Amino acid sequence: MNRKLILENGAVFHGEGIGSDKEIKGEVVFTTSMTGYQETLSNPSNYGQIVTWTYPLAGGYGINRDDFEALNPAAGGMVVKESAEKPSNFRSISTLNEWLKLKSIPGISGVDTRRLTLLLRKEGSLRGCITAADADTQTVVNELKNFQPSCDQVGQVSTKNAYHAPGNGHRVVLMDFGAKHSLSRQLIGQDCDMFVLPYHATADEIFSYHPDGVVLSNGPGNPEDLEQARRVVQSLIGKVPIFGIGLGYQLLALACGANVVKMHTGHRGSNHPVKNLAKNKVDITYQNHGYVVETDSLQETDLEVTHVHINDGTPEGVSHRAHPAFGVQFYPEGAPGPEDTVELFDDFIEMMETYNNQNQPIKGMER
Ligand SMILES: NC(=O)CC[C@H](N)C(=O)O
């Protein structure tokens, strides 16, 4: 036992170090996904978070070259019951432990992660620190009480410069708030001609690419920290079809006047049931969020709820009553996780087609 996880409430979990041996502080969150540790650790929405898995084994199929969600993994740390040292998979190129070391991500194994999860469920989200076994617990607890996650998380993970991922289909501007690679993969797979813009792009910059539609990506942190982006989204509504995902959905809700609040523990995992109200059908979705759009606050807006979480009744999707704009809280591209909701991308493409057919430029005039 050479490492420990200390929580701000004074709870201590002892274990063995995996990955980097640096000390890390961050919000401790749990995921109920049984697979997908590679995607979760590299998902920019997890920026700075210490993630724990209720599933007892991580690393069983190693790390492969294909499943990264970002060039640089964003997660702060990893807490597991057991980390497999001998992965078994034809795609594996390294063990989880080696890769965590390579990417300077600290972790701890040998922790009763279900006990940890029960504690997080009871107390709500807690700040924690992975550190050496001989660190002074009280000093760390005091430090944790003053620890505040950065308000510029999106700035850390968004692309620094605009770039083009050419395709032959609809022209889509992807607003990158920390977009997962699988979101780009999905849009490219549907032959979209994609322009990826940094999170601080203005409405004029967006329109300078003459997009058929705009996708607002997932991303880390509190959407209220993105006041400029909220105003930009507000100015896009009604002028171009919009599809918001995760943080992008929350920004769409904020732009329409709804409230977003922090959840008690959040939704993280590949097994979240969501009801599609129009189709009266339940989809299993992959989710990863700690903030939620307040149901009551939607009543004052032009948004209607399209999807609801079966477990707790929170809204999971909204659609604008008057303009082509919709969004979902979960990840429709389903990576890692079920692909039940992937047809939402077809809905977006259809929305772009309908809107652009109705708004054909008059001959000889620029749009
Ligand atoms: N799924 C996401 O994009 C995460 C959104 C936001 N950072 C949250 O935690 O609620």
Image (cartoon, rainbow, N blue to C red):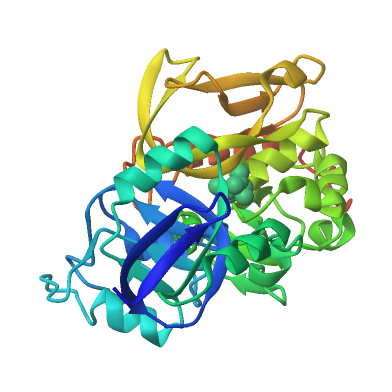
Image location of residue 251, percent across then percent down = 73, 42
Q: Residue 168 or 16: which is nearer the viewer? A: 16
Image location of residue 263, percent across then percent down = 60, 35
Residue at figure coordinates x 33%, y 44% from the top left? 115
Residue at figure coordinates x 68%, y 39% from the top left? 250
Q: Residue furthest bottom?
A: 102
Q: Residue 211 or 92: which is nearer the viewer? A: 92
Left or right: where 76 falls relative to 270: right
Q: Is residue 281 visible?
A: yes
Image location of residue 320, percent across then percent down = 71, 25
Q: Quadrant of the N terminus?
A: bottom left
Q: Hey, which quadrant is residue 280 in on the image?
A: top left
Q: Residue 37 or 3: which is nearer the viewer? A: 3
**Rendered position, 18 above or below 188:** below
Residue at figure coordinates x 40%, y 74% from the top left? 133
Residue at figure coordinates x 62%, y 19% from the top left? 305
Image location of residue 36, percent across then percent down = 31, 57
**Rendered position, 56 above or below 88:** above
**Rendered position, 260 above or below 198:** above
Q: Residue 240 or 52: which is nearer the viewer? A: 52
How many numbered callouts? 0
Left or right: where 208 falls relative to 58: right
Q: Is residue 328 visible?
A: no
Q: Hey, which quadrant is residue 32 in on the image?
A: top left
